[in-house]
Amino acid sequence: MSIIKFEPVRDLETLSQRLQRYFEDFPAFGSEMESSFYPRIDISEDEQYLMVEAEIPGTKKEDIKITLEDNILTIKGEKKREEQKKEHNYYRNERCYGAFTRSFTLPVEVNPDEVEANFEHGMLTLKLAKLQVKPSNTKVIEVK
């Protein structure tokens, strides 16, 4: 008689994988269903600037609004669905559309008057000048 090791988690993983494959074959139940669009963001810095890069393919720059308030950067926009052609028979329709909002509390204080924004080839690039921290002018006063 052999002993069989019981692994319930493995069975759940197999079920999860089967369900995932099933839903990959049917990404949207009906052509009218729209997925939410969620642009990817990179934030980096150097000595003088904080840089923000956002992938927003298929969006027009007129459909993007950027605000900076109390060191919170907000990027809003909408990726609009193109009109589907009735004479085409679609086999797959996986692209995501819709309105989006991304807000970030910036890791350093920035000067709101020194912000550059550029949108080219689906990439939004922001260059925000850091506020220069003035060294504290502390003087020790001797008590007599």
Image (cartoon, rainbow, N blue to C red):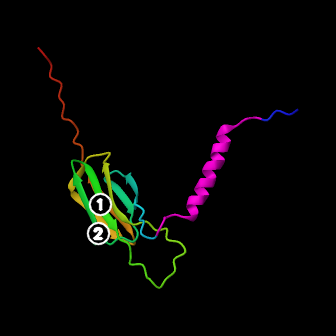
Report, in whole angstroms, how far the alpha carbon at label 2 lies from the one at label 1. 8 Å
Residue 129, position as x, y percentages in the image: 27, 55
Picture disc at residue 56: none
Which mark sits nearer the N-terminus, 2 or 1? 2
User: The disc labelled 1 sits on which kind of residue?
Assistant: Lys
Choose top left, top right, bottom left or bottom right for residue 126.
bottom left
User: The disc labelled 2 sits on which kind of residue?
Assistant: Asp
Residue 8 is inside the magenta segment? yes
Q: Circle 2 sits in a helix, a strand or a loop, which is it?
A: helix
Residue 7, position as x, y percentages in the image: 70, 37
Q: What residue is drawn where x is 49% and y is 83%? A: 88
Q: Which residues are magenta?
A: 5-30
Q: What residue is drawn where x is 58% and y is 64%? A: 25
Left or right of residue 135, residue 91 in this image: right
Foreground: 142 or 130? 130
In the rendered view, would you say 20 is above or below 123? above
Residue 8, position as x, y percentages in the image: 67, 38
Q: Circle 1 sits in a helix, a strand or a loop, which is it?
A: strand
Locate the C terminus and report the quarter of the image it occupies.
top left
Foreground: 80 or 129? 80
Magenta part, dominant SS: helix
How crowded is the residue under tag 1: few (<14 C-alpha within 10 Å), some, or many (20+)? Answer: some
Residue 15 is inside the magenta segment? yes
Foreground: 137 or 91? 91
In the rendered view, would you say 24 is above or below 131? below
Residue 51, position as x, y percentages in the image: 35, 56
The residue where tag 2 is placed is 63
In the displayed image of the protein, which residue is found farthest to the left?
144
Left or right of residue 133, residue 38 in this image: right
In the rendered view, would you say 1 is above or below 26? above
In the displayed image of the protein, which residue is found farthest to the right?
1
The residue where tag 1 is placed is 76
